[in-house]
Image: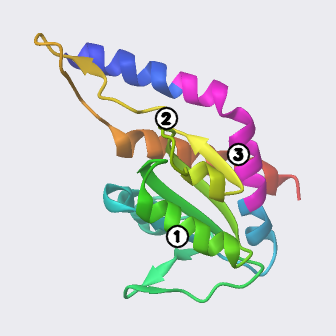
Amino acid sequence: MLKIFTTQLTGLFKKMSEQEEFAFEDGARLLAQASLGEGKILIHGFNEMEAIVFEALHGAEPLPKADRLFVNGQLTEIDETDRILLITRFSSDEEAIALAKQLREQGHWIVAISAVTETSSPSLVDYVDVHIDTKLTKPLIPDEDGSRFGFPSVMTALFAYHGLVLTMKEILSEY
C-alpha cells in the first residue's frame, strides 16, 4: 500500500507543479511585494492547515516577514503593504470563504491554497487574488470494498506552500 500511496502522491505533486505553475508565480510575486517593502505576510490555516503556519513561522527555514493573521483569536491589524496567505482543505470551506470575502471587501491582497471542489455555491477562488489548487478532492488509495482512504491534505498544502516560497525566493534573488 505504501507503494500505491507514494505513486499517487508523486503523481499529484507532478500534476500540481505543471497545472498550477502560473498560480505559483503570481502568488509568489504578490507575497514578494510584502517582503520587498514594509509589509508582512499574514498567514492563516484552517483546522489541520495550521501545520503550514507552524512551518512558515517555526520551520527549519522560516518565511521572512511572516506572522499570524489571528493573534489570541483576534484579527491582526492589516495595512496596504501586507499580503495574506489562507490555507484550507477545500475551496468550499464556508469559514474560509467568509474571511476571504471580508478581507477582499477591505481591499487586501490574498493568496489561497485549497483543493477546488465542484460546488454551485460561492468558492474561495471567487474571493482571492491568486489561488493554488492542491488537486486533492478524494482519498488516494482504493480499498477492496470500493471505498478510498489516505487523504494527505497537509502534505499537498505543504507542497504548494514550498512551491510558493521557492518561487518567491527566485523572484527576490533578482532584486
Residue 7 included in the magenta stretch of the image:
no
Above/below status of 65 relative to 163: below
| Residue stretch in magenta | 14-30
Select label 2 or label 3 by which is in front.
2
Residue drawn at the location 76% of the way across and 48% of the way down: 26
Look at the image and tell me whether residue 95 can be seen.
yes
Where in the figure is residue 67, as x and y percent of width and height? 54, 76
Give the number of the disc on residue 167.
Answer: 3
Select label 2 or label 1 by which is in front.
2
Residue drawn at the location 46% of the way across and 46% of the way down: 158
Residue drawn at the location 68% of the way across and 43% of the way down: 24
Camera-nearest residue between 15 and 121? 121
Q: Amino acid at mark 3?
A: Thr
Above/below status of 143 relative to 89: above
Give the number of the disc on residue 118.
Answer: 2
Badges 2 and 1: C-beta atoms under 8 Å apart? no
